[in-house]
Amino acid sequence: MPDVGALLRNYAPYFFWVVAAVWVAVGVGGGSALMAWPVLACALSGVLLKFKPAWKITFSWATSTAVLGLLISAYQVFAWSPLLSGDFSVLAASALGGFAAFAVVHLFLLYAGAKPLPA
């Protein structure tokens, strides 16, 4: 059975690019230009991990990108939680669940981007 940690580290650039695409969808769906920051950070992390994995800044950038996404997702969970008891409870529940799952994805990215790629 393959090691999940090694699999995450080997395909980390692609995971960062997929997460960047999801942030694009979140930004377009929410109509927020502020979502461009996690998109750019995730895309650049993927580029650095793919083409310049030995640079000193690569792992710092990937780690900080994962923390940025985790913080934004956690804030969205916090912001949607008061709406669970109102008229928007169905929308709030789906947004809260989606962002909570996305926060867990960013925890995996934090693990994947914080370690050097195997040689």
Image (cartoon, rainbow, N blue to C red):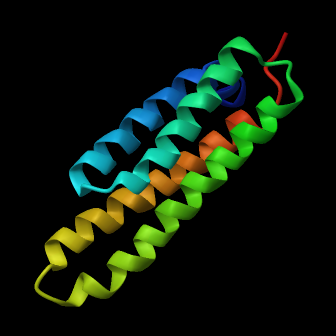
Q: Nearer the viewer, residue 108 or 49?
A: 49
Residue located farthest toward the front when viewing the structure as drawn: 33
Residue 8: x and y, percent? 64, 28
Residue drawn at point x = 47 percent, y = 40 percent = 39
- Image: 111 above or below 12: below
Q: Report the side of 18 relative to 31 (left or right).
A: right
Image mark count: 0
Residue 88 position within the rendered picture, expressed as x and y whole percent measured from the top left: 14, 79
Residue 116 makes an appearance in the image: yes
Q: Which corner quadrant holds the C terminus? A: top right
At x 44%, y 30%, the residue is: 18
Compared to 56, does 39 lie above or below?
Answer: below
Image quarter where the N terminus lies is top right
Q: Nearer the viewer, residue 64 or 105?
A: 64
Q: Residue furthest left?
A: 87
Q: Position of residue 75 (x, y in %)?
A: 48, 71
Quarter where residue 98 is shown: bottom left
Position of residue 40 relative to residue 51, above or below, is below
Q: Quadrant of residue 48?
A: top right
Residue 1 visible here: no
Please indicate whether residue 32 sits to the left or right of residue 51 in the image: left
Decide which of 7, 109 is in the foreground and name it: 109
Vertical relation: 3 (above or below) 35? above
The residue lying at 35 percent from left, 81 percent from top is 81
Q: Residue at x 70, y 31 (%)?
A: 5
Q: Does residue 14 appear to the left or right of 101 in the view shown? A: right
Question: In the drawing, does residue 31 fall left or right of residue 12?
Answer: left
Outermost residue toward the right in this view = 56
